[in-house]
Structure formats: structure tokens, C-alpha cells
Image (cartoon, rainbow, N blue to C red):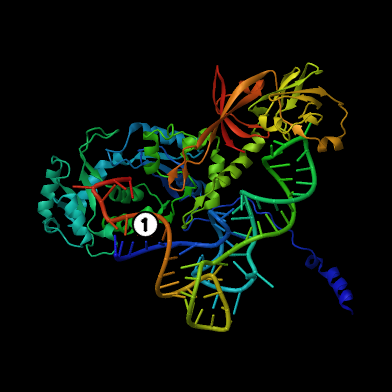
Amino acid sequence: MSNKELENKLEEVYPEYFYQKPKEKEGPKKLPPLQGAEIGKVVTRLPPEPNGYPHIGHGMSFYFNYYYARKYDGKVILRFDDTNPKKEKLEYYDAIKQDLKWLKIDWDEEKNMSDDMDLYYKYASDLIDMGKAYICSCDSENVSKLRYESKDCLCASNSVKDNISLWKDMESAEEGRYSLRLKGDMSSKNTVMRDPTMLRIVDHPHPIQGDKYRIWPVYDFACAIEDSVLGVTHVLRSNEFTLRIELQNYIRDLLNLRNPKIIEYSRFSVKGAPTSKRLIRPLIEEKVVSGWDDPRLVTIRGLKRRGITPEAIHMVAEEIGLSKSEPEIDWSLIESLNRKIIDPSSNRYYFVSEPKILDVIDASYQTINLKLHPEFDRGFRNIDITGRFYISYEDFKSISKGQILRLKDLYNIFVIHTESNQIKAMHTDEQSSKDELSKIKKIQWVSDKKIDVSIIVPGTLYEGDTINPNSLSTITGYGELDISKLNEGDIVQFERFGFVRIDKIDSKGITAILTHK
RNA sequence: GCCCCGUUAGUCUAGUCAGGUCAAGAAUGCGGCCCUUUCGAGGCCGUGGCACGGGUUCAAAUCCCGUACGGGGCACCA
């Protein structure tokens, strides 16, 4: 048998061998399974501090915790980490909930850490009784110094009896006078284990609890307790807390509480955009940006106002995953994912920037119907046509006398005269064949029945470390009249311009924000 | 300074725990073609990467050691 015959024979008995396996198109990225997860038993939490508006980084964390709770048919708890009365503000509790709802993230239970003060006191008292915590009267500077040097302070050797009595005194002492510290390990390489503070005096009203409490737990203490008491099985959070795992587990061991499984990932950022409250707040205070909802910001509100959808944010989270490297994603990724979401549902309208006049001297007045979407049946819009049109400066400058063009979706014109800011043309043969049509240059137009549209174009806030002074620009032009029927929040496409979200409608016209091309 | 963690194409990620099937697979970007009365979407093709240096091994993106770079922590913030 020759090779060829052999091949033919083989093909008869094993045809699959000769066909290239069709490449399997991968679907959207999926997050990996959760370690140790059992259906119906997963409990996660969303732990915002009500001290500002969430940004996309919080959005990622919220989504991970929400995603796994839903995936495993478990429970997700919204828990406000509000144990610093000086930082929390009432407005943020509600703002965070609104942002979560907008993100299409819901939750099964809601609670504030500040509702559990008595529980923290009870556990604190237990630690004192066990001799595992002591009241320290050193000032914070001294505490810090001794921790750095791995040295005990004198307070560490207080008797249990002394501590019990000082714990009582603490209630009425002035701020800074005493703190309750855990007996950890002063020689630990993990510096957070060196007798960390568990509770301290804060002389400031709390937005919810008012003046009811003066002794407040620090994060590690409250969090260690809550994650266990709430039945949290999985903690998905960013890695600035890595070193606290040992401490929080130690606290729980002492108090005979169960440890959750902790999964960490790095903080995530967007190129050119500040991705932390610490950086965003001063920009607002110094009026570099207009507020938490400035479309240049990657706050949830900024993204919403720009026209980024919650689904796109979910997709970004799935794309990045629970990465331990430090992702700095490009806007183009967000834009691309968002485009896939909004393209099918965005109605199309005509808009021309920096408009110039185009008169068609022999035009017929008529009303035409144009599809709101080229592929999907989303209905039509009507446009009244006269002999006057507006075209964008971009198209205008490339047009010369004698040229034949097509007003898109309307008819062909022959240019008979050009001036510095006006073109005259004549209507030409309507019977363009499909083939001819594909060759002819098409331009965007707006009829004489028009509306003023200004488009805010958000740019990059930072270039390297410096603030870009030209991060916001405005493009003005005319849009077709039906744009005035849109509502604030609608996302549409201005054909051959880009996707925009309607930001404001008033007597002066329409303001839209450019979402992306 | 000390202690943790990380480093795969321009960006992002799969693969690393259980070394060979990885001369590394997606996404995004960029380039080209097709489609389209949009410069959008969609389809096809292409481009481009294991931080560096040693070691272990028949075999290293994968294990070990070191270096560089990046991030985090060392609060009476969270």
C-alpha cells in the first residue's frame, strides 16, 4: 500500500483525524470556582466604610463577593464598617446602597458594625478576664515607638484586676487617655501582632449611634468578631489586609470563634485615573473635578454618568479576576466591553459637530423615516427635510466642487459651489445601484429642523503623576430634532461620532457626555 | 530600615500548587481583508510575551536560590 492509499484507508475508518478540530470560541471569561465552597452554604459580605462614594475598585470587590454568594446559592451581607465616628457620614450609607443597586448587586442582609457595640464590649471584657488584653495608658507615639523596637510597655504587666478596674475608668476618660490592647507577640516579625490596639476612646458623635458610645473598636477587632458571628464563610478582599489575617485569626482563636476562608487580590487601577478615595477627595475639594459623579472619575457615579453600564463593570471584574499582580487596565478594555453591551440597545441618531451649511437648491420637502437601529427592529424616527442641511466641519473641509456625494440614507448630491462656510449642491440621480452606492462617499447630515447639542468629552485626568489640565473638552453641534425627545440617562449612538449618554436637557438644548467611540 | 506579596505580548489574563500534551491559549490594542448607505457592531487573518542570573532534572513559564523592579504592611484609620 502506498502512503496515499494508506491515507485514504485511514480516512475511511477514522475521518475525524483529517479534520482540524474547529476552534472553540471561548465564551465570556468566568471566575474560577471558590475554594471550599458548598452549595447553599457560602456566606460573603460587602464591607464598605461609609466615608465616601465607592469607585470601580470597590465595585470589583462588591461584585466578587456578590458573584460567589449567588453562584453557590448562598448569602451576601451588606455590612457597614462604621467604627470610626470621625470619618463616617450618614449620607454615605444611603449613597453606597444606591450605587450597589445601580451596579445590579443586591444583598440578603444588612447591618452596621456600630449596632454590635455591646458584643464588642463583651468580648473585650472576656479578653481582659483571660489576661489576654490590657489597658494601656501610653500615648500613641510611645506605643508606636515601643512596637517598632519590640519592647513591652509597663502597662503590659498590669494585673487582671487592675485592667478590669481601668476598663471601667476608660468609659469616662478623655480621648487618648487609655486604649485596650491585645497581648500579642512583641517579638513577632508581623508588626501588627505586636500588642495591637483593640478599642480606643473617640470623643465624637457617630452618625447613627450619636453620643451613645465613647469606646470604639478598631477594624481588626470588630472585623474579626463580625466575620465569625455573621457566619461569613469566605472573605474576598484586597491585599492591604494580608498581615491582619494572622491577627484576626488569633483574636478569633482566643474568643473561640470560627475563622472564615480569606482570599485576597491586589488593588486594581485604571490608567490615568485616580482609584482611591484618598486621591479622589482632594480633586473634588480643589474643584479639579466637579464632584463624585464627574465623568472623568472612575467612581461608580462617574462611570454611570459617562454611560458605562453595570454589566460592563461585571465583565471587567470577570476579565481581571482575583489577580494577585497589580493590574492597571486601559480604558479601552472598559470601552470595548461596554460597547458590546450598549451597541444592540442604543438607538441611532444624526449629529454633526461644528456644523456648516449645505443647501440643496432643488430639494424636495419631505418627511423620511430612518431606522433607530441598523440591525435590530427598534422602530423608526421621522425627519423633516427642506433644502437646507448641516454637515460637520470634518466632512465639509474635504468636499470640493464637482464632487458627487451621498447624504447618508437620503440621496445623492452634486456639489456646484463651495464657499468658506457654505456649500451649494444639486440633487442628482436617485437610481444609484447597490454597487455604485458602496463606492460613493457618504456623509452625515442634520436637516434644518435641528437642536443644539453640546457634548462633554471626558479625557484622562492624570498623565503620569501630573494632572492633565485639558482633561475635559466640549464639542458643539446640531442634532436631529428627535434627540430632544430623549430622556436624561438615555444612551444612544450619534452615528459616526460615538456613543453618548444624555446628561441634561433644558431650554438651551441638550448636553450629552461622550461615553466612547 | 524590617516583614509580607507579586512579575507571562503595549494593557489584561489562562497555564505555576500536582515539571513533559506550552516552540504558551483568550481578551483588549494595533495592522490587513470581508461585511455594512456609521468611522459602531459582526466575521476572518496577522502582530506581539514566560523580568534577569544561577541551580535541580532526561525535561523548567512551572521546583529551588539570588538579583532587579512593582505593590502592601509596620495607626488609639478602614
Front residue of A41 and A155: A155
Q: Which residue lies most toward the front here?
A: A420
Whether residue A52 is visible, yes or no, is no
Mark 1, residue position: A242
The spot of residue A386 in percent (x, y) is 75, 17
For badge 1, the amino acid type reads: Thr
Whether residue A67 is visible, yes or no, is yes
Kindly indicate the quadrant of the structure image that contains residue A420. top right
Crowding near pointer 1: few (<14 within 10 Å), some, many (20+)?
Answer: some
The residue that appears at 63% across and 42% down in the rendered structure is: A340
The spot of residue A200 in percent (x, y) is 21, 45
The spot of residue A146 in percent (x, y) is 18, 58
> Looking at the picture, does residue A505 appear above or below residue A184?
above
Kindly indicate the quadrant of the structure image that contains residue A110. top left
The spot of residue A360 in percent (x, y) is 78, 20
The residue that appears at 56% across and 41% down in the rendered structure is: A311
- SS at mark 1? loop
